[in-house]
Image (cartoon, helix red, strand yellow):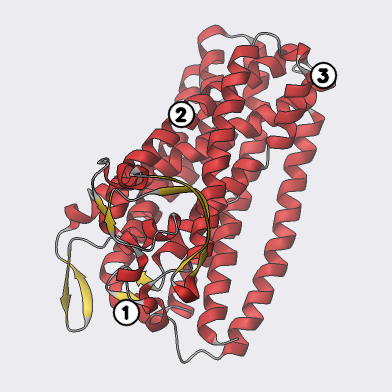
Amino acid sequence: MDTLLLSRLQFAVATLFHFLFVPLTLGLSILVAVMETRYAKTGNPLHLRMTKFWGKIFLINFVVGVVTGISLEFQFGTNWSRYSTFVGDIFGSLLAIEATAAFFLESTLIGVWAFGWNRLSRKAHAVVIWLVAGASSLSALWILIANSFMQHPVGYVIRNGRAELSDFMAVVASKFALLQFLHTVPSAYILSGFFVMGISAWHLLRKNEVEFFKISFRTGLALALVASLFVFFEGHMQAKDLAEAQPAKVAAMESHWETGARAPLYLFSWPDQEHQRNRIQILPIPGLLSLLAHHDINAKVTGLRDIPRDEQPKVWVVGLTFKLMLLLGVLFILETLYGFVKRNRLEDSPRYLKLMVWSLPLPYLACSLGWIMTEMGRQPWIVYGLMKTSDAHSATVPASSVMITLVGFIVVYGILGAVGFSLMARAAKKGPAVEA
């Protein structure tokens, strides 16, 4: 394997592993804040126990997430130096803002919250966890703005062979960035809601702390239900902007080859990219792809045959990850709607509780599929339309060095993941502490 492929694999491993922890930080901070707000208002010790129980898991997750994220920014200098040279003025400033204005603030506030028990009043301590949740979302916003520039570059000029920032507000206020934020962060809320529901269901099946975990389950359910519905409809709204900014990605998502109006959508298709056609295509629905992509049943949708072969993404990867993500999204809606019906009779619904225990890892899978689809759908561009991935890596770094560090990342991250998830599993199984 050459340096380019190894560098891509290394960044993919680091990113996907880091993103196992990021969504839970975003969503669980909200849920813990809701629980502590209830305690601050009522003084009910049950809500205090809930805050501390889920807060402990939140802290473990946050620490492991921080450790796994540190290496990502270093890779831009080691493995992707030509990319850093080309867009450093823009991308570097966004990452710097994220670190100084969001991540440092988030870390400081988490320290205040973790060590502020009995040092702050109930209400002041509850305010701190809300600030933590806000700082977490702010950090995610800046990261997604940086990623959105790679997906849909705006606010730049090409000068001396480099992309230089010309309009900071155009980058920050990019519609593409806003839509990506509105899709990614609520998806994290789904994951966090299912995380809380899965652990609560496990305890409810064993009749452990029934009142405690019924309230926890309903709290996670409320967030997951709202977020599931929102993400589904927001994804539909995002399709139009995506079709305009990255027509190749949309065509690959649905294995669409022929440019034309009233483009059909097949309920099942399997691409044959070598021959620029579908090997299998079943049950076409005329005009549905036009409607979904442009909100107009008569709109023209660009087909992959009108895109040069060397600028087409891997169609089977993009299409498969998209369809699996979509199916999981529908499943999440059905599960949470059923849970809403059963919310007051959870202990009498053992089959549903077992389903929710087994469903706990599914949002993790959906989030990973979403990022694979997003990043693979942009290929072969690292900055869409401006710079190809093959021109962005550090060509002078030997493949053997990248291979060694790739193996090192897999080993170290594997150990960190095992430790992190085992600590969270142990805390989750142990259950809440009994307050004196």
Residue at numbered disc 3: 208
The quarter of the picture where the N terminus appears is bottom right
Q: Secondary structure at mark 1?
A: helix
At horizontal 81% and vertical 21% (from top left) the residue drawn is 205
Q: Is residue 150 visible?
A: yes
| Real-space Cα separation, disc 2 to disc 3, in angstroms | 31 Å
Whether 172 is drawn above or below 425: the answer is: below
Q: Amino acid at mark 3?
A: Asn
Q: Secondary structure at mark 2?
A: helix
Residue at numbered disc 2: 229
Q: Amino acid at mark 2?
A: Leu
Q: Around disc 2, counting alpha carbons within 10 Å, would you say few (fewer than 14), some (14 to 19), or many (20 or more)?
A: some
Kindly identify which numbered label has been placed on residue 225.
none
Residues 5 and 328: in front is 328
Whether 45 is drawn above or below 399: the answer is: above
Question: Of label 2 and label 3, which has the lower sequence position?
Answer: 3
Residues 137 and 389: in front is 389
Locate residue 160, reporting x and y percent: 17, 84
Locate residue 132, reporting x and y percent: 46, 36
| Real-space Cα separation, disc 2 to disc 1, in angstroms | 41 Å
Kindly identify which numbered label has been placed on residue 85.
1
Q: Secondary structure at mark 3?
A: loop
At horizontal 33% and vertical 66% (from top left) the residue drawn is 92
| Real-space Cα separation, disc 3 to disc 1, in angstroms | 56 Å
Locate residue 378, reporting x and y percent: 39, 65
Question: Of label 2 and label 1, which has the lower sequence position?
Answer: 1
Decide: marks 2, 3 in contact (CB < 8 A)?
no
